[in-house]
Image: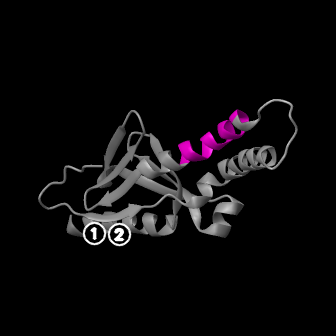
Amino acid sequence: MSLNLSSDEKVLQKAKIHWISILPQSFIFLMGVMIITAHLLGGSDKGNPIPIGVFLMVPLLWKSLSNYVKDYRITTKKVYLGSGILARNVSETMIHKINDIQVKQSLSQRMFGAGNIIFSTGNDTSFTIKDISKPFDFKNTVNGVIEDKDKAA
């Protein structure tokens, strides 16, 4: 994502999507591989299951590509969110408008070091960054920028 940064703004951190986000699609992908492998290694002559196997592989490829194009960054002034494969959605929120930051983790996310971050802003809206690696590092970076802004004011 091309960021239009001001002259005194720099990127402090870029969030990475955790691999756990593709785990459900990975199981479906493996089912597709098993169907194709069983057919190629001497399955029955009843029909051709290869299209079904290929169809079961598509969700993992789509989710992987979707994760690859997601872009979440913290700068000295803003939080940038970018996503979308065919259509691009980009939003930015000024750091000083963020009122609350929550980290939510399911059991599996906690086991593997992933999590969701929920940002609440001044106009009672919120936005979520899902399945990122090291969510507490991302949260602490935002909190650090907010504290620096408060000290400077």
* Residue 55 inside the magenta-drawn segment: yes
Q: What residue lies at 46% left-to-right and 61% top-to-bottom? A: 16
Q: Secondary structure at mark 2?
A: helix
Quadrant that contains the C terminus: bottom left
Q: Percent x, y for residue 55? A: 66, 36
Q: Which coloring applies here?
A: one colour
Residue 129 visible somewhere in the drawing: yes
As measured in the structure, the alpha-carbon distance from the residue carrying label 1 to the one carrying label 2 is 6 Å
Type of secondary structure dominating the magenta stretch = helix
Q: What residue lies at 67% left-to-right and 69% top-to-bottom? A: 111
Q: Residue placed farthest to the left in the image? A: 7
Comparing 1 with 52, the one in front is 52
Left/right placement of residue 117 relative to residue 107 reads left
Q: Badge 2: how crowded within 10 Å, few (<14), some, or many (20+)?
A: few
Position above or below: 146 against 65: below
Q: Percent x, y for residue 142? A: 37, 63
Q: Percent x, y for residue 40? A: 77, 46
Amino acid at the residue labelled 2: Gly
Comparing 148 with 5, the one in front is 5
Q: Which mark is residue 148?
A: 1
Left/right placement of residue 144 relative to residue 32 reads left
Q: Which residues are magenta?
A: 51-63
Left/right placement of residue 117 relative to residue 152 reads right
Q: Secondary structure at mark 1?
A: helix
Picture quadrant where residue 131 is located: bottom right
* Residue 34 inside the magenta-drawn segment: no
Look at the numbered discs 1 and 2 and tell me whether their residues touch, using CB distance below 8 Å.
Answer: yes
| Residue topped by disc 2 | 144
Amino acid at the residue labelled 1: Asp
